Amino acid sequence: MTLEEKVEHALKNIVLIGFMGCGKSAIGRRLAEKLNYPVYDTDSIIEEKEKRAIKEIFATDGEDYFRALETTTLEAFVNAGRKKEIISTGGGIVIREENIRLLQRLGFVVWLDAKPETVVERLSRNTDRPLLNTENPEETIRELSLNRRPLYESSSHLRLETDGLDFDEITTGIIESARYFFGTQ
């Protein structure tokens, strides 16, 4: 699908993707405040529906089950056809090809990117990330980040490097880019 076709079929939402710890949830809340849009977090929606934490879903049912829940959540957003929302996603949502198509149908997809060192620093005290429960979480972050880069790139309309930027700089950049994106529709 060409960029023009992606724009033509997109709903008018701002969708945040990127690796865990890149700031999707925080930026989503800040964008919601500035734009007066509701903000939704796919991980929170899944936890609420499942009535258990993601860590528990991974431990009990596995990653494939969780990824299927992500797809169902995205499908619900697309089918609802709602506009002017901020949607923050889980870091691995791009793993499934069908999710990439769904993300692009939802609206303007922004890849928040951060260097692995930044992610390591931000997540160093977090024990709730199932994929980081390894002997060497830093190496896991580097490997997963590298493997997912092409998926984030193919999913997004904008890549925004967040290292060294504050929330206002990031949100202003996203808002201005989204205005341009939706203005071309």
Image (spheres, rainbow, N blue to C red):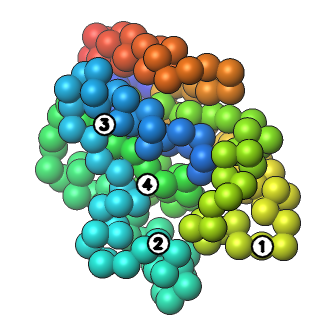
Q: Which residue is mark 4?
A: 99
The amino acid marked with disc number 3 is Ile
Quarter holding the N terminus is: top left
Q: Pick the residue in front: 56 or 99.
A: 56
Q: Is residue 98 above or below residue 84?
A: below
Q: In percent of the image, x 38 and y 36: which residue is there? A: 28
SS type, badge 3: strand
Q: Is residue 105 left or right of residue 131?
A: left
Q: Pick the residue in front: 66 or 20.
A: 20
Q: Are marks 3 and 2 in contact (CB under 8 Å)?
A: no
Q: In percent of the image, x 15 and y 43: which residue is there? A: 81
Quarter holding the C terminus is: top left
The mark closer to the camera, 4 or 2, is: 2
The amino acid marked with disc number 1 is Thr
Q: Which residue is mark 3?
A: 86
Q: In percent of the image, x 40 and y 60: which residue is there? A: 43
Q: In percent of the image, x 37 and y 78: which residue is there? A: 52
Q: Earlier in the sequence, mark 4 or mark 1?
A: 4
Q: Residue 54 bears which disc, if any?
A: 2
Q: Earlier in the sequence, mark 4 or mark 3?
A: 3
Q: Is residue 63 left or right of residue 139?
A: left
Q: Earlier in the sequence, mark 1 or mark 3?
A: 3
Q: Earlier in the sequence, mark 3 or mark 2?
A: 2
Q: Pick the residue in front: 162 or 156.
A: 162
Q: Is residue 92 above or below residue 36?
A: below
- CA–CA distance in space, label 4 to label 3: 17 Å
Q: Earlier in the sequence, mark 1 or mark 2?
A: 2
Q: Residues within 10 Å of mark 4 (few under 14, many from 20)?
A: many
Q: Residues within 10 Å of mark 2 (few under 14, many from 20)?
A: many
Q: Which residue is mark 1?
A: 134
SS type, badge 2: helix
